[in-house]
Amino acid sequence: LDATFGLSGMRFRGGHYEIWQLGDGVRLEATLVPVALPSLSHHIHLGPGAHLSWCLVPRLLASGWFEVDGQRSSFEGCLAYHDHNWGCFGWGGDFSWDWGCALPDDPGSPFTVVFARMHDRARRRTTATSLFLLKEGRHLRYFRNAEVRFEHEGWMSPRPRGRIPPA
């Protein structure tokens, strides 16, 4: 698996991902080592003729560096998350989703939580909910629909830091 886009790219070698961005502005080089089994969902129904597939690697160990405006920061063995989605759908269709991953502050903790919720575009009707509980990188429990209750209140606080591009 190799992809290069100008001065950015990624590859999968020896069981880990290598990613980089070496142009102007934000620069980075990182190695991401999966420490959890990936999860794959195919053809999630979004509406007539529309579907979404989703692959997630809910726990990785990230090491490397990033640089913003010439100021470099290094990191080693930090917990990370990766997902990717694709499918047959048009942006602006009658669907939306929320998802997230909860990683512990302590990389030694064996637990990871991933959640997802599918809605109509207006977010008035929820069509599916799920929550994955992982222990030591393996699926321990999967909760669906009536087994999961989400509550949303206000904006996330504090706002996420280190997002590229900024939130």
Image (spheres, helix red, strand yellow):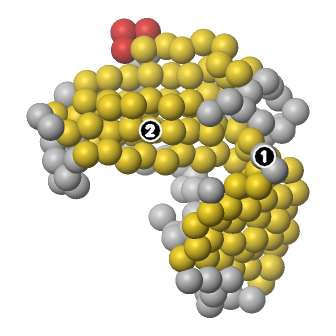
Q: Is 67 placed above or below 164 here?
A: below
Amino acid residing under circle 2: Trp
Q: Which residue occupies 74% across, 27% down?
A: 137
Q: Which residue in the protein does label 1 denote?
A: 15
User: x, y percentage for residue 133?
Assistant: 62, 20
Q: Is residue 140 above or below residue 11?
A: above
Residue 111 shows in this picture: no
Q: Which residue is mark 2?
A: 54
Earlier along the polypeptide chain: callout 1 or callout 2? 1
Taking the spot 44% from the left edge, 38% from the top edge, the residue there is: 54
Q: Residue at x 48, y 64 (%)?
A: 167
| Residue type at tag 1 | Gly
Q: How far separated are the C-alphas under marks 1 and 2?
A: 20 Å
Q: Are marks 1 and 2 in contact (CB under 8 Å)?
A: no
Q: How many discs appear?
A: 2
Above or below residue 155? Residue 57 is above
Q: Quick check: 61 left or right of 21?
A: right
Point out residue 24 in the picture as x, y percentages from the top left corner. 62, 90
